[in-house]
Amino acid sequence: MTVLVLDNPDILAKAARAFASAAGQLSASADRPHRNRFHYGFNKHTLDAADIDMLRRHATYLKNHPGIRVRIHGHTDNFGSAEYNRFLSRLRANAVARLLIQEGVPQTAILLTTWGSERPLTRPEDHAANRRVELEYLTLDMAQAL
């Protein structure tokens, strides 16, 4: 058996792109919007116009790739009670899901998870960074296993 070892990064990158393209993976990830995190003001669950535009791009991607699902993670900062923070994180995640559904994404392609303040992005003192919704893309196989 002969083994070919490639140590040229350019050749490796071209081979990886060719392999992914042949498998249909590169085209699916190439047009996916890269921004998956959306931040909120204190005690708010509405997004600004730029965030809504980006979520519409996510909706277009999801409609064009029916084998992919998205999990929406709702988060809050640590102000307020744990019960209220879970409620607020649910409002944030539901608002994003509602927008995606209004844009034509099937409800079955959306999964919701709400964390309240349990999973801060940074230190708990960084309140603004922790008030967010995150989108996590899942393949159909991963979504069914969860």
Image: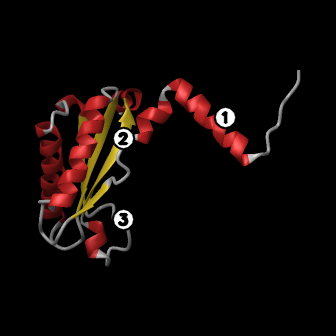
Residue 86 lies in quadrant: bottom left
Q: Tell me the tag on residue 137.
A: 2
Label 3 to label 1: alpha-carbon separation: 36 Å
Furthest-top residue in this view: 1
Label 1 to label 2: alpha-carbon separation: 25 Å
State which tag comes first along the sequence, 1 or 2. 1
Residue mark closest to the camera, 1 vs 2: 1
Q: Residue at x 34, y 47 (%)?
A: 33
The amino acid type of the residue labelled 1 equals Ala
Furthest-bottom residue in this view: 125
Residue mark closest to the camera, 3 vs 2: 2
Q: Which residue is mark 3?
A: 121
The relative height of residue 10 versus residue 63 in the rendered view (above or below) is: below
Q: Of 98 and 130, which appears nearest the observer? A: 98
Furthest-right residue in this view: 1
Q: Residues within 10 Å of mark 2 (few under 14, many from 20)?
A: some
At which x and y percent is residue 72?
A: 26, 46
At which x and y percent is residue 3?
A: 85, 29
Q: Residues within 10 Å of mark 3 (few under 14, many from 20)?
A: some
At which x and y percent is residue 27?
A: 45, 33
Q: Residue at x 23, y 40 (%)?
A: 59
Q: Residues within 10 Å of mark 1 (few under 14, many from 20)?
A: few
The relative height of residue 114 versus residue 144 in the rendered view (above or below) is: below
| Badge 3 vs badge 2, beta-carbon distance below 8 Å | no
Q: Which residue is mark 1?
A: 15
Q: Residue at x 55, y 31 (%)?
A: 20
**Element at badge 2?**
strand
State which tag comes first along the sequence, 3 or 2. 3
Q: Residue at x 15, y 72 (%)?
A: 42
The amino acid type of the residue labelled 2 equals Tyr
At which x and y percent is residue 41?
A: 17, 70
